[in-house]
Image (cartoon, helix red, strand yellow):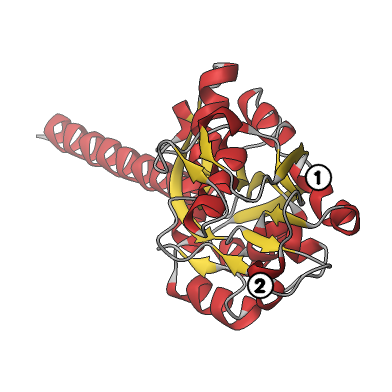
Amino acid sequence: MLNKIKLLLLALGLVMFVGCGDTKDSTESSAKVESSSNQVTTLKVGATPNPHAIILENLKDDLKNEGIDLQIVEFSDYILPNMALNDGSIDANFYQHQPYLDKMVEDKKLKIKSIAKAHIEPLGFYSKKIKDIKDLKDGSTIALPNDPSNGGRALILLHNNGLIKLKDSNNLYATEIDIIENKKNLKLKSLDAAMLPKIIDDVDAAVINGNFALQAGFSVKEAIFLEDERSPYANVLVVRENEVDNANLLKLKEALNSQKTKQFLEDKFKGEIIPAF
C-alpha cells in the first residue's frame, strides 16, 4: 500500500513538472511572437522626386504603424531605378508607366514586374513661344522624349491633336518612320526626358512628361494640350518577380491604392496627376 502511494505521488510530481515545463515553453513562444511582431522591416523604394517621392512620403506614417520603415531612394533618371531593383539594391520602385517597364524588361532581360497602378501623369505639349496650336508655324521644332515608350507616346499625342498622322496610332512604340503625314513639316528633336523642360526656350514646343513638368514648376494649365484619363500610361509600383507575394510589399501596395492616397492626390496636385485606381 505504501509503495502504491509513493508511486502515485511520483506520478503527480511528473505531471506537475511537465505542466510547468509546458507553461514555460508557451510563455517563451508567446514572447518570441510578441518580439517578432515588434520588429521593424525596412523597405527601400526608388522614386523620382516629384511627384513619386512626395506620394511615398505621405505613406510613411501608415506604414510605420504596420511595422515598416519606408526609406525613399531618389533617382533623377529613368534607367537606374530598374537596374537597382533588379540587382537587389532597392526593394521596389515607383516612377514609371507600364509600357516603359515592359520595354525595359524586354531589352534588359530584367526580372521585375508591376503589382499596382497608382496614377497618370498626363503628357503635355508645352511652349514658351505660342499660346495656341494654331500659332505653330511651318518648320517648327518640337522636342520629344527619346526613350522608346515615351517617344511613341509623344507621337500619339501629336497624332491625336492633328499635328501629324501615324500609320497606326495604337502602336505604343511608334517612331518617326511611322509618320505618314506631317503637313507643317515639323522638325522633331528627341532628347532625354529630364532635359526637355530645360531646353524649352530653345525650341518652339516640347512634349514633356508630367513628373518632369511638375519638377520644373509647370502647371498642366499651361499645357496647350494634354493626355486625358483614357491614357494607358498609368504609373506603377514595381518589385522583383520573386517578391510579388511579399507581405510587406503588399502592405505598401495597399497603402498606395488606399482611399486616403486618392484623396491626397486630388488635394495635393489638383488635377496635375490623375488617380488610376
Q: Which mark is residue 220?
A: 2
Q: Could you tell me residue 272's position as x and y percent?
A: 62, 72
Residue type, numbered disc 1: Ser
* Quadrant of the rendered image containing residue 266: bottom right
Which residue was labeled with disc 1?
76
Disc 2 residue crowd, few under 14, some 14–19, many 20+, Cα 10 Å: many
Measured along the vertical axis of the image, is residue 223 above or below residue 144?
below
Q: Amino acid at mark 2?
A: Val
Picture quadrant where residue 200 is located: bottom right
In the rendered image, the quadrant that contains the C terminus is: bottom left
User: Which is nearer the N-term, disc 1 or disc 2?
Assistant: 1
Q: Establish if 11 lies above or below 226.
A: above
Image disc number at residue 197 = none
Relative depth, front residue between 36 and 207: 207
Q: Which of these two is toward me, 37 or 92?
A: 92
Relative height, residue 197 to residue 218 (above, below): above
In the picture, measured across the screen, residue 141 lies left or right of residue 238, that is right
Give the SS element for disc 1.
loop
Does the residue at mark 1 contact the one at mark 2 (Cβ under 8 Å)? no
Q: Are there few (<14), some (14-19), or many (20+) residues within 10 Å of tag 1?
A: few
* Point 54% across, 53% down: residue: 157
Between tags 1 and 2, which lies in front?
2
> Which sits in the foreground, 17 or 66?
66
Residue 127 position in % (x across, y down)? 77, 65
Residue 47 placement, left or right of 68: right
